[in-house]
Each structure stands twice: as C-alpha cells, then as structure tokens.
Amino acid sequence: MLLGPALVVSALLFAIGVVGVLVRRNAIVLFMCIELMLNAVNLTFVALSRYHGVGGQLMVFFVMTVAASEAAVGLAIILAVFRHTTSVDLKTNTLLQG
Amino acid sequence: MADTIFVALGAVAVLSGLGCILQRNPLAAAIWLVLTMLALAGMYLILGAPFIAIIQVLVYAGAIMVLFIFVIMLLNLGHAPSDVRGPAAWAVGLVLAVGMAAFLLRLGGYDPGRLAFELTGTRDLSAAAVFATAEAARQAGEAQGVVGAVAGPLFTTYLVPFEVTSLLLLVAIVGAVVLAKRKI
C-alpha cells in the first residue's frame, strides 16, 4: 500500500515549491520551483493511476509536454529580459508593477 | 523491501527539493532539482509505471533541466548576489506552505474506495480500477507490454488531446525562436 506515502511526499514537495516561489527573486529559480510543483502533482497522478485507471499516467504525459513547452517559452522570455536589463532579479524588473 | 526503498526515495526527493529552494547558487539549485526528479523516477518505477519513469528521466531530468542549466550558464549567473527575500516573505511563504501542506496531508488519508462509493454506491473498485493489486499490474504488463498499456488509451480515448499536444509543441517552438532571436 504505497498510496499514503506517495501522497505525503507529493504534498511536501508542493509546499516546498510554494515556499520557493515566494522567497526567491531569481526568475530562473522561480521557474525551477514551478517545475517542482508540477512534479509533485505528477506523483499524485501516478500514485492514483494504480486505482483509477491508466488515464492518470496519460495525464502525466500531457503535463510533461506542457512543462517542456512552458520551460522553452519561459526561458526565452527570461533571455530577452536579461538582454534588455542585464538582470534576472525580479527586484530590478518591476516595470509591470506600474 | 519495495516499501522501504519507496519511503527512502521519497525522503531523498523532499530533502533535495529543500536543497533546490535553499541553495543560493542557481546552478547548484538546478542540480538538486535533477536529484529530486531522479528520485521521483524511481518512485514511479515502484508504483508500477515504468514508461512514465523512463519519460521522466529522458524529458525532465534530461531535456528540460539541460535547458535550464544551459540558460544559467549562458547568462553566467553563478556569481550573482543572494536572491533570497527577507524575513517578511519567509513568514508569508512558510504560513501559506504549512497551511497548504496540512490541507494536502489530510487528503493523504485518501481512500480509493471512497470515490467508487460516491460514484456507484458500492465500495467495489473493479469498475474503476485497472490493476487491483501489484500482482495484477505485473500480469497486465506482461500481457500487453509496458508501452502498450499506455499507448492503447493514448491513441484511442485520448487521441484529440494527443494531437492538440503536438500543436502546442509547434507553437512553443515558434514562440521560443521568435522571443530569443535578436533580429527576425
């Protein structure tokens, strides 16, 4: 019976990702924390797919595809911002805050 | 035995996740995240999803993290000053995370029979479950093949999402090139 431990690990990983997003200012590290949260959700999908059908594993497949395209576009945006301001620190990139 | 390894891998995943958010150097944080993903791949293997485990290593630990490390090295961020926010952000973050973790841990006592009960009125899982036991999963894997068990529904029930995914990847490729190129 591995469902309980899997859900506990998933909950802890998701909470760690939330803390990371809130306490870090480096845009790339922020992205990595989002990947951490996506991984936590993937673990839940796989753990539950043992009981509720193989659809959970397919959902992980789709989440990975979305994460890959998100990383590609997001890192391209970070690259463009860095070229503009020579910094990926969110403290200096506050133009959208008005 | 498998349970012990599973719990150990879970501990590795959580600890290296902590390393990822506490490490000041972005490159070191990325390496910790790779370790988290490898531990998760091992957990998928024990959970009876070998195809997802291999995809996890290839796509996540391989392709996506290489992209991250590539960008970190390209921007030369290794010697950047500390980017960790002050105590106010830590307080907000910890309160939110502890509350969220407590809520999610309550869901950790989730019982698969409950969903079946709410849907059908009986606690019989056989309608929803593909593999009732690990032994049944092993037998199904032998009968259908590891990839076949995933590929069957992917190309029948989930065919439309699968095709939309290919469109999404095309859009992401074009978008990344347009954003990162200096002159188009």
Image (tube, grey):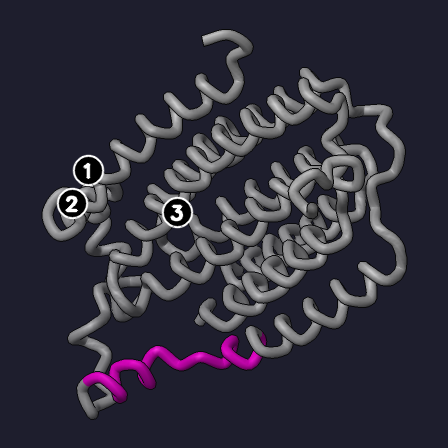
Amino acid on which the number 3 mark rests in the picture? Val
Seen from this angle, which residue lies furthest front? Answer: A98
Q: Quadrant of residue B86?
A: bottom right
**Which residue is more in the foreground, B48 or A26?**
A26
Write down the residue under mark 3: A63
Vertical placement of residue A46 versus B168, above or below: below
Q: Secondary structure at mark 3?
A: helix
Per the image, the residue denoted by label 1 is B163
Q: Are marks 3 and 1 on the same chain?
A: no
> Is the C terminus of chain B in the top left, top right, bottom left or bottom right quadrant?
top left
> Is residue B11 shown in magenta?
no
In this picture, which residue range is highlighted in magenta? B105-119
Q: What amino acid is found at the position of numbered circle 1 in the picture?
A: Glu
Please state which of residues A88 and B61 is positioned toward the viewer in this rendering: A88
Badge 3: residue crowd in 10 Å (few <14, some 14–19, many ≥20): some
Residue A21 placement (x, y as % from top left) = 68, 51
| Residue at the image point whose x is 44% and y is 34% from the top | A68
Q: Amino acid at mark 2?
A: Val
Q: In this figure, which residue is indicated by the disc labeled 2?
A: B160
Q: Crowdedness of circle 2 by 10 Å Cα count: few (<14), some, many (20+)? A: few
Q: CA distance from mark 3 to mark 1?
A: 14 Å
